[in-house]
Amino acid sequence: MPNIEYELNEKIHAIIINPYLTWEDFCANCDLIKKYNIKNISTSLNFLADFKNRLSNYSPNINALISYPLADLPVSFIDELVCFAKDKGANGIEYIPNFINLSKRNLEIFAAEIEQVKLSGLPVSIIINKSKLQEEVLYNAIEICLELGIKNFQFGDGFGPPITSNDIPEILKIISNQNQIKIVGGIKNLTQVIDLLDAGINCIGTSKFYEIFQEVKII
C-alpha cells in the first residue's frame, strides 16, 4: 500500500479534453473537481467558458491546451488562439511546438514560435513526447526553452508508451529540479502517481482522477 505524503489535490491535474463528452458527464467532472478540491485543470479551448460558468464559485488554475496533440497550428494563428484562451479565463497555456523546425535546424524559428506564445503573459508549459524525438532534437528543444525562460515542462502526451519512474532520472538530469515537471499519459492508479512523485517529478496529469481519488478514499 503506498504511503501518501503528498497534497494530491495539488499534485494531480485533471485533464478534460474528450470531444465526445456529454454535458452531463462534463458537469459530473466539474462536481468531482470541486469535491476533491483539485487545484489544476488542463482542457481544450472549447471547454474554457463552460468551466468558468460551472466553477464560478471555485477557482482552480485552468490551463488551455493549444496545438495539442498534433502540433499542427500555423504560427500565424498563435496570437489569436492564445488571446482567445486568455479572454475565456485561462490561467496558463500548455503548448506543443513544431519540432520539425529543429530537425530542419531552424532553431531560430522554433524559438520565435515559443516566444510568440509567451507574449500572452500567461505561464507556458511546453509538452514533449520524449519517446518520439531524436536525442539531438530533444536536447535542442529543452535548451532553447530554458534559454527563453520556460519553467514548466510536460513529458508525455497520451500517445505512445507511458513514462514510468525509471525514466525520471534522465528527465531530471536534462531539466534540473529547479523547473516544474509534469508527467502525462497512461496514469490510471494511485500506485503510479506515488511512484512518479517519489521519483522526483512535481505533478501528474490524468483523466482518471476520479478513480485515483477513489483509491485514496479506500486507503
Image: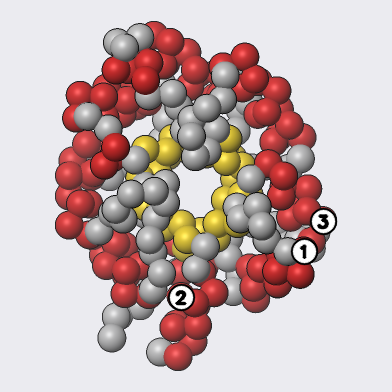
What secondary structure is marked by label 3? helix
The image shows residue 9, relative to residue 144, as above or below, that is below
| Residue 69 position within the rendered picture, expressed as x and y whole percent measured from the top left | 49, 39
Q: Nearer the viewer, mark 2 or mark 1?
A: 1
Residue drawn 69% across and 36% down?
85
| Residue 4 position within the rendered picture, expressed as x and y whole percent measured from the top left | 35, 77
Q: Residues within 10 Å of mark 2 (few under 14, many from 20)?
A: many
Mark 2 = which residue? 212
Precedes in sequence: disc 2 or disc 1:
1
| Residue 46 position within the rendered picture, expressed as x and y whole percent measured from the top left | 72, 44
In this view, the residue farthest toward the bottom is: 218
Q: Left or right: where does residue 102 sit relative to residue 53?
A: left
Precedes in sequence: disc 1 or disc 3:
1
Precedes in sequence: disc 2 or disc 3:
3
In the picture, residue 131 is in which quadrant? Answer: top left
Residue type (three-letter) at the residue carrying disc 1:
Trp
Mark 1 = which residue? 23
In the picture, residue 191 is in which quadrant? Answer: bottom left
Mark 3 = which residue? 53
What secondary structure is marked by label 1? helix
Quadrant for the C terminus in the image: bottom left
Residue drawn 57% across and 19% down?
74
